[in-house]
Image: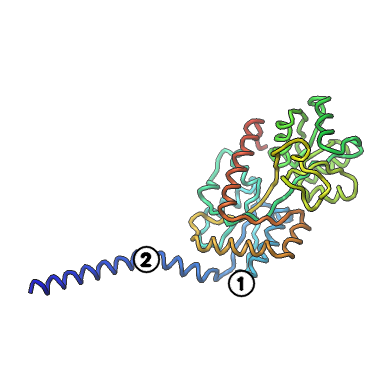
Amino acid sequence: MKTTNHHRATAARRHILSGLVAVLALPLLAGQALAQSYPTQPIKLIVPFPPGGPTDTAARIIGQKMGEGLQQPVIVENRPGASGMLGTEATAKSPADGYTLVMLASPTLLAGHLYGQKKYDLFKDFAPIGSAYDLPIVMVVNPQVMPDVTGLQQLVAKAKAQPGKLNYTSAGNASFGHLSTELLKSQGQFDIQHISYRGSAPAITDLLGGQVPMMFSDMIAALPHIKAGKLRAIAVGSSSRVVFTPEVKTVAEQGFPGFEAVAWGGLLAPSATPADIVARLSQELKKALADKTVQEKLQQAGTTAAYATPADMGSRMQKDFDKWGKVIRDNDIRNN
């Protein structure tokens, strides 16, 4: 009798334990099933900048190709404002199911240093999917105003000969061109004065008109004028030469070893998005960027395909956040 009761008790415990294991496994199995069936509906890709800019253009090119691999459309939705923070915040508050993503760009990464109140943490509230593109920047001068400046060392010598007298422009206070020039000034120990504009277009207009002699411009805005001979490219900010202007040396090649300034973009998802879904999205992003047609379209838009894994994107985010944060603090740069 005792043996029978013992067997019954043991069987009951086993039944309870197996039931408990099954219950504990349910979320894991559900997550796996979700990842295997994903996606079953269109994916929204929030671009936190206005239509027509480099981030928007790159997102549409990449999103269209990713949609083919995912067999669901990737629909771009523009939510501009506050250097990309408004659209990024909306993504942070979205369900972490892989159906709402955001395109991170350098201005949004740096906005954390420039805005007092932040409603999200870029490093805690998001999961990197992968880097997507690089946006090269180029130092250009007006050849009529500076006919003798054909390289960076000549520009530096000219600036050192008249400290604080030369001006440069940028697309705005705390813009990537502004920060890159301040970094260059710090490394080269020379002084030129910043004249801020609201956007690349008016800055380029006054550069062409000779009101200001130089600027670090994104390649998209400057390239047509470089090709027309109205602006002279004297250096690129990336660590290696770029396809758009292969004859133009890097800043590092011209006496500034280690200098690197490249704006870039990549995809983020809310941080609780299942790892299998993040991996699937990263795989489709990598495949899209390996496509020759996609690469050509991105080049036509002034950007270059530049895939990096989620881990590498996360490292790049932290590195750039720290690097440019120091430039902002050292020069007391504020958003206005």
Is residue 291 visible from the viewing direction of this image? yes
What residue is shown at x 79% (from left), y 53% (from top)?
243
Quarter of the image with the N terminus is bottom left
Which residue appears at 81% of the width and 47% of the height?
Answer: 222
Image location (x, y in percent) of residue 84: 63, 49
Task: For mark 1, give the secondary structure.
Answer: loop
**Mark 1 to mark 2: distance in Å?**
29 Å
For the question of whether residue 79 can be seen, the reply is no
Q: Please tell me the numbered disc located at residue 25.
A: 2
User: What residue did someone put label 1 on?
Assistant: 71
Residue pictured at 66% horizontal, 33% vertical: 333
- Total numbered circles: 2
Q: Residues within 10 Å of mark 2 (few under 14, many from 20)?
A: few
Q: Taking 1 as reference, is 25 left or right? A: right
Locate the C terminus by quadrant: top right
Label 1 Cα neighbours within 10 Å, binned few <14 / some 14-19 / many ≥20: some
